[in-house]
Amino acid sequence: MILVISSSFDQTIDYIKHKHNVDNFYRFNIDNFSSYAVFYDQNGFSITDLEGRTLLERNCSSIYYRKPTPELLPQKLDSKYHNHLYREVFSLADGISEAFRGKCLTKPSILRKADNKIYQLGEAYEVGFNIPSPLITNNIEIIKSYFSKPIIKPLSSGIVEYDSKREYVQTNLVDFNKDTTSLKYGPCYFQEFQNKEYEVRITIIDNYVYPVKIISENKIDWRKNNNKIQYELIDIPNKIRKQCFNLMRKLDISFGCFDFIVMQDKWYFLEVNANGQWVWLEIELGLDISSKILRHLQC
C-alpha cells in the first residue's frame, strides 16, 4: 500500500487514481486530520480513516508526500491554540515520512531544503547554470540601485491561505510608483527582467525527462489568468540535461520541475520545484509522467 500524504483537494492524486485505476493508495488528507485515528509507537505508524480502513507501517510499501495543508479548525477551539495544533499535526505527518525506511517521494526535509531559493541558487551556480541577476532583500533602495527593470516573485511557495481560501502570489514587474513600505517586513526575490523567445518546463522523474516549450502571450508570467499559451515538445541541449541531473543529485531529489527562459539559444535557469505540478502538461501533450511516478513508488 502506498501512503499518500496530501489534502482532500489534491486533484493530482485523483487524476492518477482515475487514469491508472490505482487501488493501492491510502490517502491521508491533513486538511481532514481530525477524521483519522492516528498513532505512532515502537512498531511504527497506524492510521485509520472514517471508513475503518487501517494502514500499518509494516504494510506500507512507499510514501508519496504531496501537498498537505492545515485543517480548518472549529471556532470552539480558541484561535490562540491554532498555530500550535498545526505544528503538532505537521510534526506528526512529517515525522512519519522522515522515519519511514522505505521509499518516499519526497521527504519533507529534502523538499524544504531543495525548494529554499537561497540554497538552490548556490547549488545552481555550482552546476554552471546561467541565472538572471538574482537579489533577495527587504530593502527597496537596494532594488532601485541594483536593477533597471526588476521583476519580483515570492521567496517561498507564493501561496496565501486563510479561512478555506487560497491566493497565489505571482511574478510581476516592480512598480516603483506604488507603496513599497511593507517590503521591509518580509524579503522578496528580485531579478533583472530578461527578454525571452519562449520558456521551457522540464519535468524529470528518475531518468525520464519531459521537456516542454511554452510560448506565452504574457512575457512576465505565463501562469497569469486569461493568458494565451502554446505547448509543444522540445529537444534540449545535452549540457542543460546534464546540469539538471547534476542539480538533482546535489539536492538529493528524484523528481523536479525545472523552469528556463530561452533567448537566442541562451538558456537561463529560473528555478526547480521539487514538488511541482505536471498534470496539465501530461494532458496537453499526452505524456506519461504519472506512470513513471507510479513506477518509482512501486519499485
Image (spheres, rainbow, N blue to C red):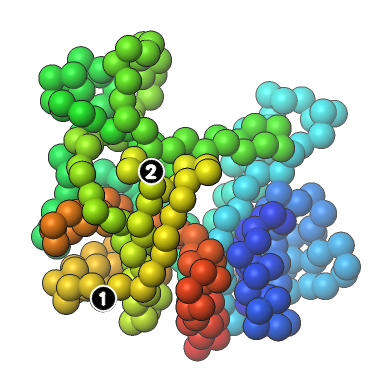
Q: How many marks?
A: 2
Identity, as a three-letter code, of the amino acid under mark 2 = Asn
- Describe residue 84's horizontal placement relative to residue 78 as left or right: left
Residue 181: x, y in percent?
36, 11
User: Is residue 270 among what the camera can see?
Assistant: yes
Along the viewing direction, whichever of 116 and 292 lies nearer the viewer = 292
Q: Nearer the viewer, mark 1 or mark 2?
A: 2
Residue 166: x, y in percent?
62, 38
Identity, as a three-letter code, of the amino acid under mark 1 = Asp
CB of mark 1 within 8 Å of CB of mark 2? Answer: no
Looking at the image, which residue is at 42% across and 60% down?
230
- Describe residue 51's horizontal placement relative to residue 189 as left or right: right
The residue to which callout 2 is attached is: 218
| Residue 26, above or below 180 | below
Looking at the image, which residue is at 38% across and 47% down?
217
| Residue 10, above or below 45 | above
> Quick one: SS at disc 2?
loop
> Quick one: SS at disc 1?
loop
The residue to which callout 1 is attached is: 235
- Describe residue 170's horizontal placement relative to residue 220 as left or right: right
Along the viewing direction, whichever of 27 and 189 lies nearer the viewer = 189
